[in-house]
Image (cartoon, grey):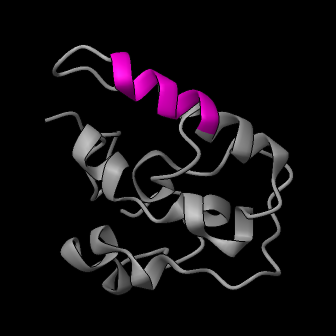
Amino acid sequence: MNMSGNSKVPYTIDNIKKCMCPKCPVQADSKCAKDKLNSLTKELGSIQEGGVPEPQNVPGIYCSTGKATCQDLNPEEQCICYTCAIWKEYKLGDGTPSMYFCQNGKAV
C-alpha cells in the first residue's frame, strides 16, 4: 500500500477511482483540472498492475496528496468532500483539515 507522507488516506488506484474531486464544483470550471482528468483517464487504461500515476497528474485525491497544483480552482464554490466514500471510510470529518483538501492540504 502506497502512503502519501503522513496522510490518513493511502494513495492507491482504488482510492483514485473512488475520488469525487473530479465532480466537485470547486474545480468544475478549471481548465487545468479538466486537462489532467483527460490525461488521467488515458493513463489509467495503460498503467501497470500495482502502479499509480504521479500525484501531480491527478486532479483529485487531495485528501491523500495535499493541495492542488492547479491554480484555477474556485474555493468560493461548495466543497463536496463529505459526499465521498473516501471521506466516510477514513472518517476525514474528524481530522484536520476536514474539507477543501485541494486548498487546505492532505488529511492528517
- Identify the residue shown where x is 72% and y is 70%: 26
- Residue 32 located left or right of residue 84: right
- Identify the residue shown where x is 31% and y is 42%: 11
The residues colored magenta run 38-46
Foreground residue, 64 or 77? 77
Per the image, is 41 magenta?
yes
Q: Can residue 91 be seen from the camera position used here?
A: yes
Q: Quadrant of the C terminus?
A: bottom left
Magenta residues: mostly which secondary structure?
A: helix
Q: Is residue 93 above or below residue 5?
A: below
Q: Can residue 53 be seen from the camera position used here?
A: no
- Residue 11 located left or right of residue 24: left
- Identify the residue shown where x is 38% and y is 28%: 44
Q: Residue furthest left?
A: 1
The x, y position of residue 86, in whole percent, is 29, 67
Q: Quadrant of the N terminus?
A: top left
- Identify the residue shown where x is 22% and y is 71%: 90
Foreground residue, 43 or 107? 43
The x, y position of residue 40, in whole percent, is 52, 32
The x, y position of residue 92, in whole percent, is 33, 76
Per the image, is 67 magenta?
no
- Residue 67 located left or right of residue 89: right
